[in-house]
């Protein structure tokens, strides 16, 4: 106590706050104690991860040091966006550019390069690296913008736009550079190829949807009329090796194990086997489409839900229809529109069944009863679990054209 009383005011308060583990206040008092406590201040921030409070307490050159250290920490944690932001705030633009490059934020990379007033050659090199990185991650639309705006590479920009199925952008770029020949030689064939692929996709998905819908309808009827399931039988089936072989999860795990075995040594396999002996891994539910699987219903519901046309797909069909019309492919346009309209109608007709909650097995039935009794509500005669309902809907997109 005597030593504490001999300290100046703010170091004294700092010691008290540390004793009480009030780290934010301790930092505040340490900052007020003066510049001679800078090293101790930085150590306190790092030890107790006080970076966020420090940004509100500290200012000046010391704040830049804190921001830099925090950015380094976030960069190691692969939080590149936040790291880039902090490096930008403390004016370490080279580090910020490197962080934004790692996460593909090419617009931030390019405007920071312009802020640094880099030479045209350096800017082009940076743009080329970003465009290649975006292509590696299949972000062709963004890569096309870089090739167009920063590299003035018409052919590559058009190629990337086509790969990203952004045909309108490909046409715009081609005409911008006076490369009219690319429209006929590259873009139109790509549009027709997209038409063929989408028509085949619609046909395949419609066939699969009908099969799965009819099977789910049959299962629902059987579930209502058949005797109650034995949960022990379900567990035995799920643990059965033969049944597991039909599961995609089981197949994937087998392949993974085979790959591991081919790479490992005999001794490592033996030691791993000894360590793992006696340990029983928890069994996952095996959602398989094989008829007779107790979880077949869940599989069918998932697959039917995945068959619902997404907003993006509807917008792609919308753009494709208008492009076919603009190149006088009226017959193909009408065929695609009719096929997609019929597919959406098919999916909508199956929504009532898909949005009907599943009939419960014995174990789930008991859980539902207990829950409903707690709520003091009457159990539905079909024992439909109200909390398991996930409502599926088709997003409303005006994709059809009225010019046919």
Image (cartoon, helix red, strand yellow):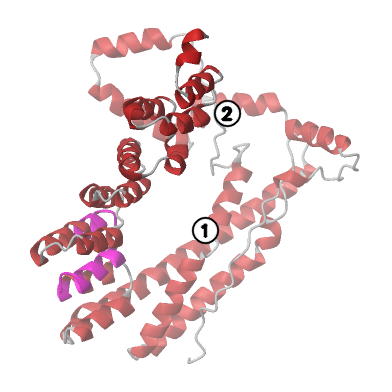
Element at label 1: helix
Q: As rendered, which of 197 and 260 lies closer to the eye? A: 260
Q: Give the mark, 1 or 2, whose residue is nearer the N terminus.
A: 1
Which residue is drawn at the image coordinates 15% and 63% (left, top)? 123
Label 1 belongs to which residue?
208
Locate residue 94 relative to residue 238 in the image: left or right.
Answer: left
Farthest residue, direction left: 121
Locate residue 296 relative to residue 361 in the image: left or right.
Answer: left
The dot on residue 397 is none
Residue 309: where, in percent of width, then height? 52, 65
Label 2 belongs to which residue?
238
- Tell me: residue 120, above or below residue 96: below
Whole-Å distance between the Cαs marked 1 and 2? 25 Å
Q: As rendered, which of 404 and 131 lies closer to the eye? A: 131
Which residue is drawn at the image coordinates 68% and 23% (left, top)? 232
Give the quarter of the image for residue 111: bottom left
Q: What secondary structure is the stretch in magenta mostly built from?
A: helix
**Magenta segment includes 128:** no
Give the quarter of the image for residue 260: top left
Q: As rendered, which of 29 and 74 lies closer to the eye? A: 29
**Magenta segment includes 154:** yes
> What is the magenta range?
131-155
Which residue is drawn at the image coordinates 69% and 57% (left, top)? 353
| Residue 139 visible in the picture | no
Instruction: Find out whether the residues at labels 1 and 2 contact each other: C-beta distance under 8 Å.
Output: no
Element at label 2: helix
Residue 101: where, in percent of width, then height? 25, 52
| Residue 215 visible in the picture | yes
Badge 2 crowding class, 10 Å Cα cut-off, few under 14, some 14 to 19, many 20 or more, is: many
């Amino acid at each position: 106590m005597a030593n504490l009383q001999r300290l100046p005011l703010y170091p004294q308060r700092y010691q008290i706050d540390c004793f009480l583990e009030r780290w934010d206040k301790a930092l505040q008092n340490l900052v007020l104690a003066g510049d001679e406590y800078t090293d101790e201040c930085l150590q306190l921030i790092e030890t107790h991860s006080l970076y966020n409070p420090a940004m509100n307490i500290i200012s000046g050159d010391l704040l830049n040091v804190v921001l830099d250290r925090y950015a380094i920490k976030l960069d190691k944690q692969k939080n590149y966006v936040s790291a880039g932001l902090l490096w930008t705030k403390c004016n370490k633009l080279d580090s910020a550019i490197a962080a934004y490059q790692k996460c593909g934020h090419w617009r931030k990379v390019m405007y920071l390069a312009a802020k640094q007033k880099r030479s045209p050659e350096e800017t082009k090199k940076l743009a080329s690296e970003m465009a290649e990185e975006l292509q590696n991650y299949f972000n062709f639309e963004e890569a096309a913008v870089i090739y167009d705006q920063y590299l003035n590479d018409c052919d590559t920009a058009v190629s990337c736009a086509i790969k990203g199925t952004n045909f309108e952008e490909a046409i715009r770029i081609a005409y911008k550079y006076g490369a009219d020949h690319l429209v006929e030689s590259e873009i139109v064939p790509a549009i027709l190829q997209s038409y063929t692929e989408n028509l085949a996709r619609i046909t395949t998905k419609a066939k699969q949807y009908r099969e799965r819908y009819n099977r789910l309808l049959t299962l629902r009827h059987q579930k209502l009329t058949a005797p109650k399931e034995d949960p022990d039988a379900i567990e035995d089936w799920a643990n059965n090796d033969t049944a597991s072989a039909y599961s995609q999860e089981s197949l994937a795990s087998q392949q993974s194990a085979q790959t591991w075995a081919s790479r490992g040594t005999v001794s490592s396999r033996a030691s791993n086997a000894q360590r793992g002996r006696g340990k029983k891994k928890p069994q996952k539910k095996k959602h398989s489409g094989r008829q007779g699987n107790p979880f077949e219903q869940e599989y069918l519901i998932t697959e039917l839900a995945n068959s619902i046309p997404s907003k993006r797909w509807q917008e792609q069909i919308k753009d494709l229809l208008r492009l076919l019309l603009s190149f006088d492919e009226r017959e193909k346009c009408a065929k695609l529109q009719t096929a997609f309209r019929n597919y959406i109608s098919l999916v909508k007709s199956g929504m009532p069944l898909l949005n009907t909650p599943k009939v419960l097995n014995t174990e789930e039935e008991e859980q539902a009863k207990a829950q409903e009794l707690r709520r003091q509500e009457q159990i539905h005669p079909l024992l439909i679990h109200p909390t398991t309902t996930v409502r599926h809907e088709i997003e409303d997109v005006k994709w059809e054209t009225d010019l046919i």
